[in-house]
Amino acid sequence: MIRLLVVTNLFHPDFGGGAAVFSDLCYALAERGFDVTVQCAYPYYPEWKDKSGTNGWRIFCHKDKGVKVERHGLFIPGNPNSLLQRLLYEASFFFSLLRSLPKARKDFDVIMVFCPLVASVAYASCRKLFYGTPFWLSIQDLSAEAAEASGISKSAAINRLFRWIQTLIFNQADIWSSISPVMIERLKHIVQKNQPILYQPNWVHVSLLEQIDALPEKTGRSISHPVKLLYAGNIGKKQDLLRFCKALKQSDAQFEFRIHADGGEAGNLQQWIKQSCDKRFRFNHFLDESGFAQVLHDADMFVITEKQGSGGAFIPSKLIPGIRSGTPILAICDVATPLGQEMQQTKAGYRFSWSQLPQLSDFINNLPTNKDYPTWQKNALARSAFYDRDKIISQFETVLRSIVSHRPTQTDTDGKNGR
């Protein structure tokens, strides 16, 4: 039985930001015979609030579906867009995790770290230094670049320092993986020890997958009147959803835009919608999985926005359940980003650049007669097969076993499989 330690800030019942995928992987590996321990934070995301009421210094241990969970307290920012509060957030998680280090023995065969928090990677580096435990770094976000792109960090000197720290800490890992080919290309410029870089995309976790697949297939269904747009997910600086909504409000398009979201910028958007008095917009907080599956099924297009200039620092995880439902994507992003490249290659919807927003009105009004729409539906469903849950989890299992057995592993460093 392989003893696996998973380090992540997010774990069930958190949702958004990859939390459901990280949790699903741990449950699946436990079912496949791994002895899985998760060191994570108390649940707080995406609301940025202590959902358990127990966040603090005490390490709380419990079992969840065969997984040993150790919850560590951390500072939860009241303003997630504050650089100072973000630094406290990272530092508090690192030092909170460090409390487990002196008590630990060499009791894990391998560590897997999910990064968007560099603090998690720094802690795994300390474990490797003390106990020699090999670790696999799964890069969900390039944190330094994401902070710069979102405007959280505006100082060029600080941004350079963050990138240097990120590179230094990342290079302590033995194997890297990431979730898009564009991100892998960026990682190749900072790898220093010839570590393999695997392409391991995310997927739809099993309980949401069951909810989506239980609904009737919608391929070939006609467009609603008014057109039904949906945004469902986290709202932070890097989404820049408010800018999109303001542009949409200026149009005379006939649409119903339902937004189900939480996150650092959700309150600002909710307030703007209330003040705009535009009945085409409707704001609500996150839905449960059955509700999310249903609004995806009802939507004509699933909206995904990325802040202009965000580069290749991340790819929205919400893309995958969107296409699994057969809902074409309305992406507002730069062409060179991971999302932009995905849209260009798969044609699973339509991509607007931010400079093209004045054309939104005509696009929405003409959508019912757009001859490409049925093709977008088919392409979305076809592409969703690439993100097959069982196949990807089996890849994780194979690599983890190869790390422990010290066998070389075949890797796809180009991210071209399935393309």
Image (cartoon, helix red, strand yellow):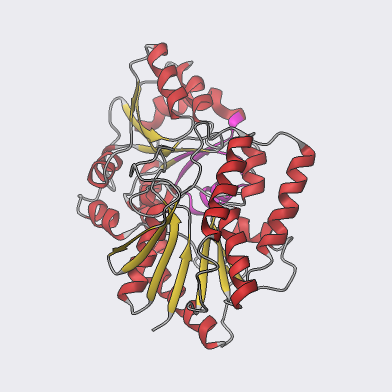
Question: In front here: 67 or 22?
Answer: 67
Tell me, yes or no, if residue 196 can be seen here. no
Q: Tell me the quarter of the picture where residue 152 sits.
A: top right
Q: In the rendered view, does 220 fall on the left or right side of 302?
A: left
Q: Is residue 221 magenta?
A: no
Q: In the rendered view, does 333 fall on the left or right side of 72?
A: right
Residue shown at 34%/80% (left/top)? 33
Question: In front here: 187 or 112?
Answer: 112
Tell me, yes or no, if residue 209 can be seen here. yes
Q: How many labels does the image show?
A: 0
Question: In front here: 261 or 127?
Answer: 127
Extreme residue in the right direction: 157
Q: Give the range drawn in magenta.
A: 330-354
Tell me residue 23's x, y (percent): 37, 60
Q: Tell me the quarter of the picture where residue 327 sits.
A: top left
Q: Is residue 338 magenta?
A: yes
Q: Is residue 224 above or below residue 165?
A: above
Question: In front here: 106 or 371?
Answer: 106
Residue shown at 26%/57% (left/top)? 207
